[in-house]
Amino acid sequence: MLKKNPHPTILLITDSVSTKTSLHKILSPDFELLVSNSKALPFFLLFEKRVDLIIIDAKTKITPAIQLCEQLRLIKKFSTIPVLLLMSKKDITMTEEAIRAGITNFLYRPLKEEQVQVALLLAKSYNKTAKKLGNKSRKLQKIAEHDPLTKIYNRWALYEMARKELAKAQRTNQPLSLLMIDFDHFKKINDQHGHLAGDSMLKHFAELLSKSLRNYDIVARFGGEEFVIILPNTSPENALLVAEKLRKKTESTPLHFEGVEIGLTISIGVACLHKDCTTLEELIQKADSCMYASKHAGRNKVSA
């Protein structure tokens, strides 16, 4: 946050000596400039030094700039600080990805004092607005990310969180699995017992999933009666065990609705990260195909 004092602090993350020199010349003596290269950044973050603004050089070598921003946004004290990305205008294609990662604004090479000062003023305005609307924004974000009926993540939040988990798994060479789940004969339940029973069934199942999984697994309502689960650091063998456990748990936990016991079964498709399945879209497509294989095999089954 840009403080009302003579020397707000700016953290510059760059591997370039010339960039450091240029910005120091522009910012001094109005700002205190802290400099870290992408390799030393994890050590820098251990210190309690207050930072009001962050500038990340798009040419960082050890860790990509977008990834650096994502990492910083996960740290509480950096979650709302303005972050500027220093880039060349020819790199304009990366702006959409940068904004999704949490970049506030952009600086372009060659650096000129006027554009730096404008960017700093915009960052200061951003910070004041973020602080004023902070609590309200968090509440709105929670509403935007969650399905209003089941209270678990919705499809939009799933894509946002799953892409980060996928990138992490690929970066650290860890396994990751995805389950696609669909109710069996859900329309029949709606027709026989009414839509309120169907809604109760969806809420009942969401609670069952939340209680049956690890706190870092991602559970989302994908649409209608379909659910998706992201299982970080989970091998294909363990993903099948989790899926089978959920299938049995669902089958043995009927819904009690207005004095009526309503049984429920599910069909599950399992997909795992490997060399022929590397994107979120490919994982979802694979799991969806396997889920339909479970349907065609008689329902209440797990397929991979």
Image (spheres, grey):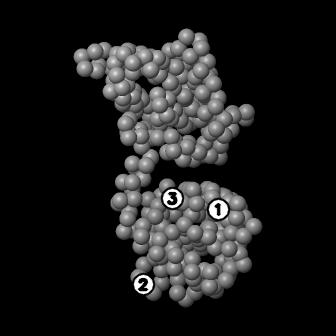
Quote the CA–CA distance across marks 3 and 1. 17 Å
Q: Nearer the viewer, mark 2 or mark 1?
A: 1
The residue tagged 3 is: 73
Choose top left, top right, bottom left or bottom right for residue 99: bottom right
Quadrant the N terminus occupies: bottom left
Dot 1, crowdedness within 10 Å: few (<14), some or many (≥20)? some
Q: Secondary structure at mark 3?
A: helix
**Residue furthest left in the image:** 259
Query: Is residue 158 visible to the viewer in this orientation of the structure?
Result: yes
The percent position of residue 206, horizontal first and vertical second, equals 40, 31
- Decide which of tag 3 and tag 1 comes sooner along the chain: 3
Q: Are marks 2 and 1 in contact (CB under 8 Å)?
A: no
User: In the image, is residue 41 above or below residue 237?
Assistant: below
User: Type of residue at label 1?
Assistant: Thr
Q: Nearer the viewer, residue 194 or 277?
A: 194
Query: Is residue 14 visible to the viewer in this orientation of the structure?
Result: no
Q: Secondary structure at mark 2?
A: loop
The percent position of residue 143, horizontal first and vertical second, equals 39, 48
Left or right: 140 as drawn, with respect to 285: left
Choose top left, top right, bottom left or bottom right for residue 67: bottom right
Q: Residue at x 62, y 39 (%)?
A: 280
Q: Nearer the viewer, mark 3 or mark 1?
A: 1
The residue tagged 1 is: 95
Q: Residue at x 45, y 71 (%)?
A: 127
